[in-house]
Image (cartoon, rainbow, N blue to C red):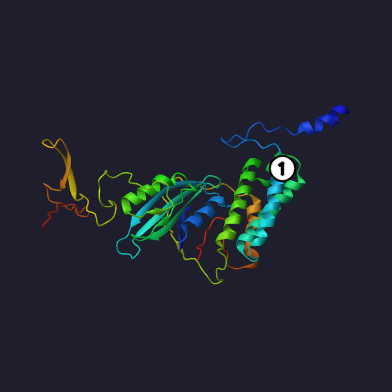
Amino acid sequence: MERSEHGNRSDTNTDYPFQLLCFLKLHTYTRVQVSIDICGVDHPSRKRRFEVVYNLLTTRYNSRIRVQTSADEVTRISSVVSLFPSAGRWEREVWDMFGVSSINHPDLRRISTDYGFEGHPLRKDLPLSGYVEVRYDDPEKRVVSEPIEMTQEFRYFDFASPWEQRSDG
Amino acid sequence: MFLRVIGRPLLAQVKQTTGIVGLDVVPNAREVLIDLYTKTLKEIQAVPEDEGYRKAVESFTSQRLKVCQEEEDWEAIEKRLGCGQVEELIEEARDELTLIGKMIEWDPWGVPDDYECEVIENDAPVPKHVPQHRPGPLPEEFYKTLGAVLSKKEVPQVTSSESSSKE
């Protein structure tokens, strides 16, 4: 699928991201040498719920292109680290936040979550407050993780209305 | 008289620097380029005829080769092609060679003629304060390549700035 927006971006959906990015990098008329960002999007209603988005830039022709691939929880994306070295950290982040791992990645480990964290934060099914909270325990002299205790009920803000909303309606 | 004989090769200025970090000056750029382009034209024969990729590569490679063979001086080559410095051209030629090898290995040919990419147009107006960084004018060989690719087939397959899905 290709969407051409008003502007200079085009999105492509493909099963072979590595080959496509290799072509984009090497071909004389699409010298895309810079990968700006690789991120993921979670659409829980779809069968292949995650979308891996590659944002790329060509300095030779001064334009940007965005490539999107779909994946589900067990699909492994082929790593583009050999083409774009900066992709190392981006793919680590996609793995950490969504759980979409990469084949042939040189160093796939968590990058922004805590060391013992279980779960993938940016998935839509992990709640905003998470499942555990950490506190320093003085008797044990270390930081312990305990199930979360919220002192305040979750408040839903409906900014469409100027009147103050009550959660029970 | 001797001055003129000695002076003429010296008139071609030696390039001091490319101005790009990490890109060294190549003194015999013209020979390197001719060598690379002939190799490219030879390698591209392995791609099936009638593929947009082959037509595009043949078109711009043969045009660049022609210009390199006609002009003696790197400065004249750069000015005539309008595609940046000769060292950049060498890099592009090398990358294209690698790419041809990889494309032959991956073999993405054989997209059916009636395959159409879904193009969704977004006509939302862009607000005035947003800077739109439009790319500069493309060199003329690009338009010739585009013409060569679009000439026989109706559906462009793998062309310059648009990419199509591979099966």
Q: Which residue is drawn at 32% across and 53% down?
A: A98
Percent from the top left, x then y, of residue B167? 50, 66
Q: Which amino acid does label 1 sit on?
A: Arg
Up-down relation of residue B167 to residue B126 (above or below): below
Q: Judge left or right: residue A49 versus residue B98.
A: left
Q: Which residue is drawn at 47% across and 66% down?
A: B118
Front residue (pair A24, A63): A24
- The quarter of the picture where residue A67 lies is bottom left
Q: Which chain carries label 1?
A: B
Front residue (pair A160, B29): B29
Q: In which quarter of the image is the N terminus of chain A?
A: bottom left
Q: Judge left or right: residue B10 versus residue B60.
A: right
Front residue (pair B91, B105): B105
Q: Which residue is drawn at 59% across and 60% down?
A: B104
Percent from the top left, x then y, of residue A142? 17, 37
Residue A31 seen by the camera: yes
Up-down relation of residue A165 to residue A85 (above or below): below
Up-down relation of residue B25 to residue A56 (above or below): above
Q: What is the residue that sits farthest to the front in this orientation?
A: A140
Residue B85 seen by the camera: no
Q: Judge left or right: residue B69 versus residue B136.
A: right
Return the residue at label 1. Answer: B30
Percent from the top left, x then y, of residue B84? 63, 43
How many badges with numbers are in the image? 1
